[in-house]
Amino acid sequence: MTANTSTEQVRIFDTTLRDGEQSPGASMTLEEKLQIAEILDEMGVDIIEAGFPIASNGDFEAVSEIAKRSKNSVIAGLARAIHADIDRCGAAVKHADKGRIHTFVSTSPIHLKFQMNKTEDEVLDIITDTVTRSRNLIDDVEWSAMDATRTPIDYLCRCVDAAIKCGATTINLPDTVGYATPDEYKAMFEQIRERVPDSDKAIFSVHCHDDLGLAVANSLAGVAGGARQIECTINGLGERAGNAALEEIVMAVRTRSDIMPYVTQIDPKFLVRASKMVAGASGFAVQYNKAIVGKNAFAHESGIHQDGMLKNAETYEIMRPEDVGVKATSLVMGKHSGRHAFRDKLKELGFDLGDNALQDAFRRFKDLADRKKHVYDEDIEALVEDEITILGESTKVIALTVIAGTGGPQKAILTMDVAGQHITKEATGDGPVDATFNAIKSIVPHEATLSLYQVHAVTEGTDAQAEVSVRLEAGGRIATGKGADTDTLVASARAYVSAMNKLALRQQADNPGALQAV
Ligand code: KIV
Ligand code: ZN
């Protein structure tokens, strides 16, 4: 495979923290969002859509904080075609060296009729008004035609023309419902670019959803049609079937540079770590056979494949695992390793913890090394990610004793820190997990129902750490929490409490006056 010589830059716009976080149950804490934004910034993402500032005080704070901290990326916030949204977004992204307002309105007949109850001309006026207002606040303005792929091309041309005339610098034409095919999507960009007089004054952008499993293919087709920005998310996280997966796009462009004359400025070595971080924060595990970042993406089981691999890796591998950050599993340290070695290992794994978090993580590492014969990189990652989750939480698990076995009923004795106060309660249940969750409920009474409980082992062996995901639902809101520990019940309690904390944050965002409202 030979690289094409005349390559053009394609910008990567990551919307994990906005469209990704919009998937039911994928809410993240501020601390988790800051960690994810940091790695996106470091890996070379051109634009990070950090949130939807009008949605809640939490979203506003996350966008503002990410804007303050970002070193290289443009920081964008989303705004509906409403003045209050645009002003709030402007106030959040103004902290960035490079900020962007991303405003959108629906353009398809079905949205105009049933969602907005507006005529085509009324929507054109809205575009003129809202893009102008955005441009009065900031130079970098992206305008999106929601449901562009189901919009008649003549009307879409008029909308794009209006947005560019009012100063939009990026025009995004999303396949909002994941309906388009690659040929159609490519043709749409070609026609719009040809027919809109000032189309060369803006950068065109693709934004694809995966309802038919075509999001990545459509995104690449849009680029072939002239788009030079791709909106995507880590692990393809997003509404319904998700968005186009960033890691797949980046590696497709890189691996097939012989037929795609484009480059992105993403360093792919960060992909696996970013994937793990987003899976941990969102609680959405990555399927084993997921392209690029799945556990089996580079595993070869059949004899023929293994034989070929031993002779020459290119027989069955089109990418090298180390290119995307897959490391050979390494034995890291034992119970005699000191704080310095631990800090160095964290650096190598890409974690940069503050003094207090480092202290706590080190204490937990020592504890883990006492209980587990071999401590691997994956163990350290699970432990630190767990620590990052706990960092921003107001309610924490302090101690847990469970009496289990054939005798029943199983009993849990739990101590929790609730806003600085230690409370201990006992509860019984149908099994040790049920007893543990009942103990949590007796300390923090709430109405939320459990909709998912999942356990998986971080490494091999009976002393492996368990990584537990718990999803809770209340009042139409869903939140997923994760916990890791060699004791599955401790991990379960942590995951439950983390989900509970996230749900409370979501509910406070809906109703800022509410306190502990799970
Ligand atoms: O899918 C979509 O249309 C969106 C817009 C808000 C850009 O996410
Ligand atoms: Zn979307």
Image (cartoon, rainbow, N blue to C red):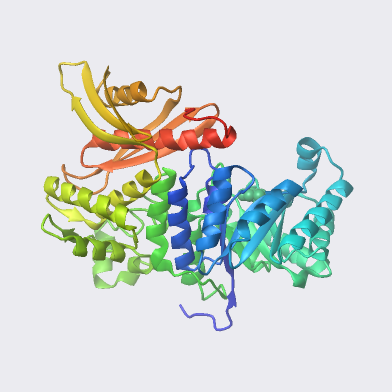
Left/right of residue 489 with respect to residue 128 in the rendered view: left
**Numbered marks: total:** 0
Locate the N terminus and report the quarter of the image it occupies.
Answer: bottom left
Q: Is residue 176 above or below residue 512?
A: below
- Give the residue displayed 32% in from the left and 22% down from the top: 438
Residue 483 position within the rendered picture, expressed as x and y whole percent measured from the top left:
32, 41
Q: Is residue 37 above or below residue 226?
A: above
Q: Is residue 362 above or below residue 254?
A: above
Residue 210 position within the rendered picture, expressed as x and y whole percent measured from the top left:
56, 49
Residue 404 position within the rendered picture, expressed as x and y whole percent measured from the top left:
18, 23
Residue 442 position within the rendered picture, expressed as x and y whole percent measured from the top left:
34, 21
Q: Quadrant of residue 314?
A: bottom left
Q: Quadrant of residue 192?
A: bottom right
Q: Quadrant of residue 230?
A: bottom right
- Give the residue displayed 55% in from the left and 29% down from the top: 476
Left/right of residue 320 with respect to residue 368 in the rendered view: right
- Give the residue displayed 68% in from the left and 69% down from the top: 226
Given residues 73 and 445, the one toward you in this image is 445
Q: Residue furthest bottom?
A: 5
Q: Residue furthest right?
A: 121
Residue 385 visible in image: yes
Left/right of residue 342 with respect to residue 52 in the rendered view: left
Residue 286 visible in image: no
Q: Is residue 284 above or below residue 318?
A: above
Left/right of residue 113 with respect to residue 185 in the rendered view: right
